[in-house]
Amino acid sequence: MKVAFKYSVVTLITLFALITLFMSGSVIFNVFGIREMEGNYVLIVVWGNFIASIIYLISAYVLFKEYKWSAKLLFSAVLLLILAFVGFYIHIHNGGLFEEKTIKALIFRILFTLLFTFFAYKITKNKNNS
């Protein structure tokens, strides 16, 4: 059961990473006209998501190998997303344009990444590696 749980979490992180990488990369590099479909996107949030997606991919591999530092890596993504949220708040406070959905999406992403962090910790807590 524990092995199935690990593979499920690794798969979920990988899928989340790939979707995030595609969507944020598409906005940054204007692939498939997604930039226009996103409306008033905030670049600091998009870049935060893009970097987080790379962290997710690395952490999925590290978790697959059951290294303890996978949880620390995922927690660094949480901190990055919180910094993006602060930047987003400053952008709003200065009168910048934004989409309401960005607030909900950032909160969801932070909570989801915290959940990934918790699962990574649970999977690797009894391992003897670093």
Image: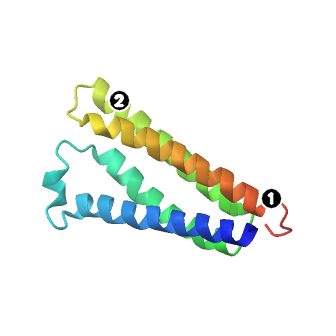
Label 2 neighbourhood size at 10 Å, few (<14), some (14-19), many (20+)? few
Q: Residue 114 location, x and y as percent?
A: 59, 46
Q: Residue 100 location, x and y as percent?
A: 27, 34
Q: Assign a secondary structure to mark 1.
A: loop
Label 1 neighbourhood size at 10 Å, few (<14), some (14-19), many (20+)? some
Q: Is residue 107 above or below residue 130?
A: above
Q: Residue at x 50, y 68 (%)?
A: 14
Question: Which residue is labeled 1 in the image?
Answer: 125
The residue lying toward the viewer, choosing from 54 and 124, is 124
Q: Residue 83 location, x and y as percent?
A: 47, 40
Q: Residue at x 32, y 58 (%)?
A: 24
Question: Which residue is labeled 2 in the image?
Answer: 90
The C terminus: image quadrant? bottom right
Q: Which disc number belongs to residue 99?
A: none
The N terminus: image quadrant? bottom right
Q: CB of mark 1 within 8 Å of CB of mark 2?
A: no
Q: Is residue 2 visible?
A: yes
What amino acid is found at the position of numbered circle 2 in the picture? Ile
